[in-house]
Amino acid sequence: AAIADRFCGDWVHTDIVGKTCEHSGEESLSECEDEGGWTAVEVQRCSRAVSGGDLLRSVRLGPFFSVPGQWRSLMTHSLRGLLNDGDRVVSFVGAPVTEAGTRIGFPPLHVHHVHVRKPERSGAMQPPVGRERASHWFETHGDYSRGDDFGVGARSAAGYATRLPEGHCYVVTSAEQIDLNAEVNDVRVDASGASELSYYLEAAFTLAPDADCKPVSKFWLRRPRSRELPTDVWERYAAPSTDSVTWWSGKMPSSGRLLHAWLHTHRSRFGGLLLLAAGPEVVNCAALGITPADGVDVAPVRNASFARAALAAAARVVCEDDASQPNSVSLRGHGSEGVADGDYDRRGGLSCRDWSFGVGDAWTVVAFSAARFLPHLRVTPQHTELWMFVDLPGVPNSTATSSPDAPDSPFFTDEANVCWAETRLAAPFSRRSAASLALAALLVLVALASSPRHSFLPWAWRTRGQYLRLPCDSGVS
C-alpha cells in the first residue's frame, strides 16, 4: 500500500476554522487560555491518487514564520470533508513541511505533539467517548524521528509516519467530528544563521480503495496520574536523574491479538521498558531491590539490570525496548545555524512478540528511568505512553480506547508502583523448567556483570549530522 508520507498536489482553501497562539514555552501556555490570544489561520485541503490505487487526503495549516525559541499552539474545528465514514486508513503522517511539502526535521522544529481526535461510539469495551478524551486517534510526537540527520528535508522525519500492519486498516466512523490540535516549538537558539523559518503543519491520511483490508483497533496504555505533578497540563509524571522504575498493571478488556506496538517517551530519562503478560504479583520490591515511597512517582532501584533480567525471567515478555536502536542523536558544530550542541530525541526501538490475549488476561508495564542526557535537571516531566494496533475477532468495526486517565477507559488504573508480598515472587519461577531457570540465572549474571551505561550497543548516534537544505522539488520518502 502507498503511505501517507507522499507529497500532495494542488491545495484548495476550505472554510474549516483553524487557530494558532504563539507563546514562549510550557510555562507560558496560560497565555493561550484566553480565546483572545488565538488568531485565525488558513486551513487548506488536498486529495489525490497515489501509487497502488490508494488515495491521499491531507489538510495543512499555515503558513507560519518561526523564530528561535518560539512555541506555537494549533487547533482546528471539525475537519469536515477530510474523511468519510467507512474510509479505510492505512497510514498517517503529521509533520511540519515547507510550502512544497518537504518535511522539516528535529531540530530545528520539535513536534511536541500532533493529536488527531475522533469520538468513539459505544462498544463492548467502553461507553461512547467524546473527542476530548479520544484524543489520540492518530498522533505524532517529537521522539518519533528516526535517523541521525536533521533540518529541512531530513530523512529522519520519515519517522513521523504511522503505518498500519499489512492487510489491516482503521475503518473510520464519526468522520464529521474529527479535529486536530498540535504544539510545535522552534528549538533553535539565536545565531547569525538562524533566520526566520517558514512552514506549514500537515496531517495526511492514505486510504485503501477497497474493503479487502481487515479492521484494526487501537489500545492506549499510560502511566496513572502523577502524585508529584498533579496539575501538569500534559499529565506527565516526575522522573529523577537517578536510576529508578515505575510500573502499573491491568487486564485486557477483550480477546484479540497484538499486531504492532509503539512508544512515546522523553528519551533523556528513558531507561527501558517491559510489557509483561503478568499481573502485579510479578513485582516483588524487596527481592528486586526496589524501594518505593509514598507521594513519589518512581522508585529507586538498586540495580536496574538485575531487576529487569529478573522480571523477564519471571514472566512472559510481550514487548521490550530494542537497545540496538538509538534513542537520541548527539549534534555538534552547528551553532552558527542556531542548532545548539546537545542531544535530541529519536524514536528508538520496541520489539514485540506474538501475543494472543483473552478477556481478563493480566498485563504489567515496567518503565525504567535513567539520566541519558540533561543530567543537570533534577526532575524531568515524563511520559510513558504505549499504543497497540490489535486484531479483535468478532469486532466488525475499528475502535480506539479513550484516555487511560478516565475511569471509564478499559485501561484505567488508579495506582502505580504497588509492591507484592515477598512470598509471591517464587511462584512464577516455580512453574519454570530447570532449563528455563538456568537460562534465567545466566541472564541475571550477565546483567550484573554489565552496566547499561557502558553497553556495546549504540544507545545514541554520535554524529555531526547534516543540516540539509534540499531543493523544493526534492523527494524524501
Image (cartoon, grey):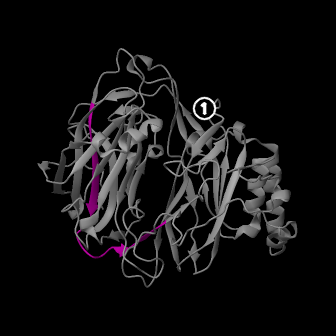
Name the dominant secondary structure of the magenta segment. strand
Outermost residue, right side: 423
Residue where numbered disc 1 is placed: 374
Name the element at disc 1: loop
Q: Position of residue 165 (x, y in %)?
A: 41, 65
In this rendering, is residue 469 above or below 101?
above
In this rendering, is residue 309 above or below 113?
below
**Chain part drawn in magenta:** 198-219
Q: Position of residue 116 (x, y in %)?
A: 34, 57
Q: Position of residue 367 (x, y in %)?
A: 65, 53
Residue lying at 83% horizontally and 70% vertically, measured from the top left: 424
Outermost residue, bottom side: 394
Residue lying at 83% horizontally and 51% vertically, measured from the top left: 445
Q: Choose between 158 and 413: the one closer to the eye.
A: 413
Residue lying at 42% horizontally and 80% vertically, measured from the top left: 123
Residue 218 relative to residue 449: left or right: left
Magenta highlight on residue 216: yes
Q: Position of residue 225 (x, y in %)?
A: 59, 57
Magenta highlight on residue 162: no
Q: Choose between 255 and 374: the one closer to the eye.
A: 374
Quadrant location of the C terminus?
top left
Residue 233 relative to residue 302: left or right: left
Q: Choose top left, top right, bottom left or bottom right for residue 72.
A: top left
* Camera sees residue 363: yes
Q: Choose top left, top right, bottom left or bottom right for residue 312.
A: bottom right
Q: Amino acid at mark 1?
A: Leu
Outermost residue, top side: 192
Quadrant location of the N terminus?
bottom left
Residue 13 relative to residue 423: left or right: left
